[in-house]
Image: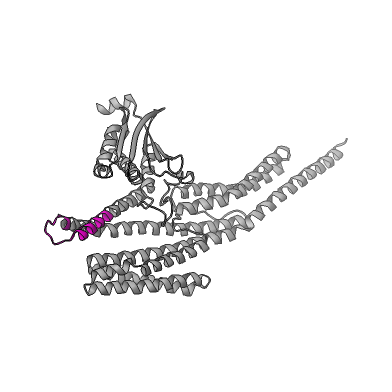
């Protein structure tokens, strides 16, 4: 075979190989293009979800402020609450009117909300008028009657219908939206990986020109996704100050532009969430202390100025104030945990001291309910923040007390070694949990049952705080139950302090 034939044969072989590689590459690109086709529509849907969540959260916040203001005005007569009610009534009405005008597709939902709100405003203004006339009992009775409660339920139902129509829920956070975004991009990354494999196989049999071309094509696809993956990891950690430069093919550029727009919306939503948490905790905590102080003064009055029925109502009000105080503290702690603002003050502490201090806060209630408490703990030292660990076990003991039966209540607190950890188990003989609830009770705002079937107080925050504090100590927490009627066990594992570290910290 002469040189000319070899060159021609080599040319045809190279052409054939290039044609095969080109056909395979073209097919791969067609798959990628098809996957990109539905991406803008998906991004639009997520943008709609963010907007709907913002509207629902704002309306819910205004309604809660109005309800709290009118109730506080009925119980305290403080004019500041009346003024606050007037201010937020206008904000809520303006919000509903603007939504009716700007969102014709959602008019049916906002009409229902506005209609229920009209009845609620009418009754709440009636309460304010009664308080102004000194008719406190009649004012309180209006807030507790069936009509008012019925309108409240209609209001909540209409708001829930609006949220469901947009596939959002009021417990949704910026973190959960980031997770949805990550899931949407996972398929695109898998297609990119398949394309890279095709190019790698091709590079082994292709000439230098094909190698250079394959490398350029692979880089043009893989590089934007690599940058996007790094940014997604930052977003998952709560950092929304990330922007990507639009580059690559047109489909990828459009996706990056939509991604940047979504990040801006997430940043606004995250900022609004922090503001709402801060405002709510401050606004609720500010009047709470003087209210509790005045209740204590009333209960200390030994004269016959108060009837026994009035004293009972004051006691119940005080209990609700204490519950509210704890709930506010839990919200602040949970927010601080999520933002990594809590710094543990660790020291060598006894596990037994932690449990005894946690029990001391509930001695009176344990005695009143005649609950039998059994303790069996090993002599062990832990490197931890004592106030925070007391907060964890006090919360778990309070839950066990709450779920114990009215008679023959039993709480057992035991500990055992588990490799380099100590496992503390708090078990009650209460109703128990369904298997479907075990993995969810530590989620933020999750509550067992619904508002009509729950027998216990709580806002679904305490166990989430416990989980955060335990994990900050390098431990873990989980629940166990063999079903309804068999009680519940909460297990907490914490690292054991080594003997060398114990000696070092002592001296």
* Residue shown at the point (24%, 40%) measured from the top left: 360
Q: Is residue 243 visible to us here?
A: yes
Q: Quadrant of the C terminus?
A: top left
- In the displayed structure, 466 sits above or below 240; it is above
Q: Tell me the residue at 65%/43% (across/down).
A: 196
Query: Residue 151: percent from the left, percent from the top?
Result: 40, 69
Q: Is residue 61 above or below residue 174?
A: below
Q: Main secondary structure of the magenta part?
A: helix
Q: In the figure, 326 relative to 307: above or below? A: above
Q: In the rendering, at what x and y percent does residue 224 appear?
A: 57, 50
Choose top left, top right, bottom left or bottom right for residue 145. bottom left
- Residues in magenta, as a range: 298-321
Looking at the picture, tell me which residue is in the foreground, 435 or 105.
435
Q: Position of residue 351 (x, y in %)?
A: 30, 32
- The residue at 35%/32% (across/down) is 414
Classify residue 154 by image quadrant.
Answer: bottom left
């Amino acid at each position: 075979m002469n040189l000319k034939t070899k060159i021609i044969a080599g040319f045809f072989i190279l052409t054939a190989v290039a044609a095969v590689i080109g056909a395979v590459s073209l097919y791969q690109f067609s798959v990628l293009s098809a996957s990109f086709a539905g991406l803008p529509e998906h991004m639009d849907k997520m943008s709609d979800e963010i907007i709907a969540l913002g509207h629902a959260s704002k309306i819910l916040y205004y309604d809660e402020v109005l309800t709290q203001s009118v109730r506080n005005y009925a119980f305290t007569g403080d004019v500041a609450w009346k003024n606050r009610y007037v201010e937020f009534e206008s904000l809520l009405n303006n919000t509903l009117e603007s939504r009716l005008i700007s969102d014709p597709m959602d008019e049916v939902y906002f009409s229902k909300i506005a209609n229920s709100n009209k009845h609620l405003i009418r009754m709440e203004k009636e309460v304010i008028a009664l308080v102004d006339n000194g008719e406190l009992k009649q004012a309180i009775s209006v807030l507790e009657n069936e009509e008012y409660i019925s309108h409240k339920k209609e209001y909540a139902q209409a708001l829930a219908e609006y949220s469901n129509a947009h596939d959002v829920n009021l417990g949704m956070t910026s973190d959960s939206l980031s997770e949805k975004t990550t899931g949407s991009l996972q398929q695109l990354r898998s297609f990119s990986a398949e394309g890279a494999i095709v190019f790698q196989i091709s590079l082994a049999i292709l000439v230098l020109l094909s190698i250079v071309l394959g490398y350029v094509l692979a880089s043009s696809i893989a590089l934007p996704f690599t940058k996007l993956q790094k940014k997604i990891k930052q977003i998952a950690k709560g950092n929304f100050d990330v922007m990507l430069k639009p580059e690559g093919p047109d489909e990828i550029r459009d996706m990056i532009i939509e991604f940047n727009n979504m990040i801006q919306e997430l940043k606004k939503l995250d900022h609004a969430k922090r503001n709402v948490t801060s405002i709510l905790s401050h606004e609720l905590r500010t009047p709470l202390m003087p209210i509790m102080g005045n209740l204590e003064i009333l209960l200390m009055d030994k004269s016959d100025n108060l009837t026994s029925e009035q004293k009972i109502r004051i006691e119940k009000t005080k209990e609700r104030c204490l519950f509210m105080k704890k709930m506010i503290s839990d919200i602040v702690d949970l927010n601080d945990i999520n933002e990594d603002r809590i710094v543990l003050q660790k020291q060598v502490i006894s596990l037994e001291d932690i449990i005894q201090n946690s029990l001391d806060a509930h001695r009176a209630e344990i005695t009143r309910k005649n609950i039998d408490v059994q303790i069996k703990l090993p002599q062990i030292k832990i490197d931890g923040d004592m106030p925070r660990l007391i907060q964890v076990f006090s919360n778990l003991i309070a839950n066990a007390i709450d779920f114990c039966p009215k008679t023959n209540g039993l709480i057992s607190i035991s500990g055992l070694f588990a490799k380099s950890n100590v496992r503390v188990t708090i078990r009650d003989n209460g109703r128990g949990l369904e298997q479907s609830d075990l993995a969810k009770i530590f989620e933020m705002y999750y509550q067992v049952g619904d508002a009509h079937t729950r027998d216990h107080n709580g806002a679904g925050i305490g166990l989430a705080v416990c989980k955060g504090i335990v994990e900050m100590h390098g431990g873990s927490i989980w629940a166990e139950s063999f079903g309804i009627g068999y009680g519940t066990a909460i297990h907490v594992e914490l690292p054991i302090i080594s003997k060398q570290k114990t000696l070092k910290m002592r001296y």
